[in-house]
Image (cartoon, rainbow, N blue to C red):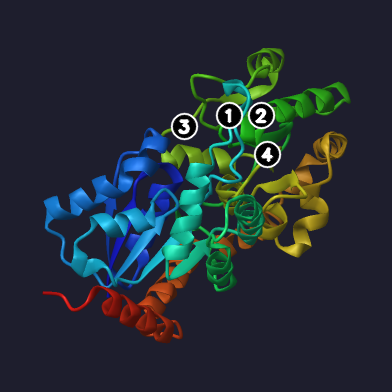
Amino acid sequence: MKVLAFEPWYGGSHRRFLDQWRARTRHDLEVVGLAARRWKWRMRSGAWELARRVTERGLPRPDALCVSDYVDLPALFGELPASWAGLPAFLYLHENQLTYPSNPAHGAAKQEIAYGFTNIQSCVRADRVVFNSDFHRREFAAAAGELLDALPHPNARAELEARLSTSTVIAPGIDIDAIPPGPGAEPRAPLRVLFNHRWEHDKDPVAFLEAVAAALAGGARLELVLLGERFRQSPPGVDELLDGLDEHVHHRGFVESAESYAAMLGASDLVVSCARHEFFGLAVCEALAAGCSPLLPERLSYPEILPPRLHRDGLYSGPDALVRRLVAHAADAASLRTPQRRSSMREAARTWSAGATARALDTVCDELGGLGPASAGLEARKARLEKSVGPEG
């Protein structure tokens, strides 16, 4: 089966998602992608640019399309050759623009509903909708319903609800084979705490550093591995907090090499998140694969990505609880370094392997291609399209 994937933001986790699928799929998957920059422009003009790439490369009509949340799917079909109009398509949402948190550093949040409404229109136009977590699906459904209630009628609320009622959850997947299990920190070393998230407002590095400072003040022996990518602007207060914690930093800085990154995960004991928002949690899953124990907020997608057996020890309720847990773990760091414990963490990450993701995505394609239960609905849709536009001349 020939599947063509369109990605206007072909970088970072979006690129890894497609590259991992392409390396494992039993279908013939080809990617048409654009450089990951100027996200608003990509959402506005990506359909035209992607369709232009199809013409330039002389790509034949595939059997199905896969598009990401950066794609305006109705606009894309308008730009593609007319003979592609009846192609079945599925939409994969890594994130959405209705609930993605605004950056306080940019001033008062502007309500730019156009980008979120593009996500809604793409959902309605797609034959199948896939979310990266059930938390994401529920959050998007609530936000989209609230927006559509506030907009003039008639609108596409009924169509959106129908599409979401048949939506699927498929994790983006991690290449677990590329992350060997590690032993944690050296036997007599302080508790080695990992923060491998982007240093941006939605991951709340300030809350993390404040919790570390409080734990140190409470007598905890800690050292920090700070691997998340930093950008030109950091959240206010980050640099001052980092300066005060400098003597406790084991490593600080983004690591380009995948091998070095995996090795640092394997040499850490505990992965911590203070995220204000998280659609899935790839960084946490990567740390689990290396053997790190988790310490995560008991909200967002985190209860979903941890198995129930890890909820009591792996989730915390608020800032004070986080500090208490850090102090307690620091007093018994050796328990996080046992082979049994670290093997158990790795096993928890296997659920989210890239292989499992590829198999699930292949099944969606099978259904789109008429090999599964979705075929009857797709045939009816194609028939309606053909009736409305007439036979091709």
In terms of depth relative to the viewer, which is nearer, 6 or 385? 385
Q: What type is the residue that disc 3 sits on?
A: Val
Asked if the residues shown at circle 2 and circle 3 are in contact, with their CB atoms under 8 angstroms apart, the answer is no
Q: Secondary structure at mark 3?
A: loop
Q: Nearer the viewer, mark 3 or mark 4?
A: 4
Q: Amino acid at mark 4?
A: Ala
Label 2 – label 4 distance at C-alpha = 8 Å
Residue behind mark 2? 205
| Residue 266 spot, x, y in % from top left | 58, 44
Q: Residues within 10 Å of mark 1 (few under 14, many from 20)?
A: many
| Callout 2 amino acid | Pro
| Residue at the disc numbered 4 | 275
Please say if the residues under marks 2 and 4 sit with CB atoms less than 8 Å apart.
no
Mark nearer the N terminus (3 vs 1) = 1
Asked if 250 appears above or below 10 in the picture, the reply is: above
Q: Which mark is residue 125?
A: none
**N-terminal label among 1 and 2:** 1
Residue at image point 53% right, 37% down: 112
- Whether residue 181 is visible, yes or no, is yes
Per the image, the residue denoted by label 1 is 199
Tally of numbered discs: 4
Real-space Cα distance between discs 4 and 1? 10 Å
Helix, strand or loop at label 4? It is loop
Foreground: 328 or 188?
Answer: 328
Quick check: 76 above or below 370?
above
Out of 353 and 362, give the one closest to the viewer: 362
